[in-house]
Image (cartoon, rainbow, N blue to C red):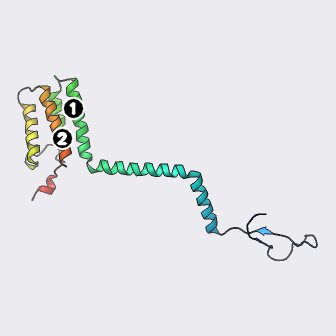
């Protein structure tokens, strides 16, 4: 027999039951809390690996989201700079003008100054690099190495500083 509590059925014996029937037992249901606990323990035993795995995946996704959100403009600008470096290395003769325009647009997006960068609102190190970009864009034809050096310098600046928001710095 099971270990559940056994009781006599409520009321008297049924009408058609044989005479002398003494041992009629029926199982009572466990309380709802015990049933829920048993179901939860069974689910944990059955799906523990999946629960741990998906909890880990969720934590990693949240961590990645926080990491990316912290400096998403910088990550985007560095990605665009890497694309421009590859373009210059692949096609050094035709690339400087499109690279210069694309880089200026990317910098305007990075600093939230679209459609163009307000050079006076930038920190001095950025002003120097934007001046060098203007010289490369509008001055005499420069070798590809100068463009690649400028792109490396700009990429390094995005790692050193967060973008300056002109709304926050204006008095």
Q: Up-down: is 124 above or below 137?
A: below
Q: Disc 1 to disc 2, how far (Cα)?
A: 15 Å
Q: Residues within 10 Å of mark 2 (few under 14, many from 20)?
A: few
Q: Is residue 123 left or right of residue 15?
A: left
Element under label 2?
helix
* Foreground: disc 1 or disc 2: 2
Q: Which numbered circle lies on residue 23?
A: none
**First along the sequence among labels 1 and 2:** 1
Q: Is residue 102 left or right of residue 3?
A: left
Q: Position of residue 78 (x, y in %)?
A: 23, 39
Q: Position of residue 76 (x, y in %)?
A: 26, 41
Q: Are marks 1 and 2 in contact (CB under 8 Å)?
A: no
Q: Quadrant of the N terminus?
A: bottom right
Q: Is residue 104 visible?
A: no
Q: Position of residue 103 (x, y in %)?
A: 18, 36
Give the residue furthest to the left. 140
Q: Residues within 10 Å of mark 1 (few under 14, many from 20)?
A: many
The residue lying at 90 percent from left, 71 percent from top is: 21
Q: Up-down: is 8 above or below 148?
A: below
Q: Which numbered circle lies on residue 84?
A: 1
Q: Nearer the viewer, residue 82 or 1?
A: 1
The residue lying at 84 percent from left, 70 percent from top is: 24
Q: Position of residue 35 (x, y in %)?
A: 64, 64
Q: Which residue is mark 2?
A: 156
Element under label 1?
helix
Q: Nearer the viewer, residue 55 or 79?
A: 55
The residue lying at 70 percent from left, 67 percent from top is: 29
Q: Nearer the viewer, residue 127 or 57?
A: 57
Task: Report the number of discs.
Answer: 2
Q: Quadrant of the C terminus?
A: bottom left
User: Which quadrant would residue 80 be assigned to in this image?
Assistant: top left
Q: Is residue 124 visible?
A: yes
């Amino acid at each position: 027999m099971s270990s559940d509590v056994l009781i006599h059925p409520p009321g008297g014996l049924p009408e058609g039951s044989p005479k002398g029937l003494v041992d009629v037992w029926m199982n009572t249901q466990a309380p709802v809390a015990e049933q829920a606990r048993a179901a939860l323990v069974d689910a944990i035993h059955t799906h523990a690996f999946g629960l741990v795995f998906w909890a880990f995946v969720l934590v990693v996704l949240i961590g990645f989201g926080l990491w990316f959100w912290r400096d998403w403009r910088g990550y985007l600008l560095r990605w665009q700079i890497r694309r421009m470096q590859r373009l210059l290395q692949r096609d050094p003769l035709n690339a400087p003008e499109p690279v210069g325009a694309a880089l200026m647009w990317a910098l305007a997006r990075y600093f939230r100054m679209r459609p163009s960068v307000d050079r006076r609102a930038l920190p001095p190190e950025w002003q120097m690099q934007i001046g060098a970009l203007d010289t490369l864009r509008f001055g005499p034809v420069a070798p590809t190495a100068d463009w690649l050096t400028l792109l490396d310098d700009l990429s390094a600046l995005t790692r050193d500083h967060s973008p300056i928001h002109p709304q926050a710095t204006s008095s």
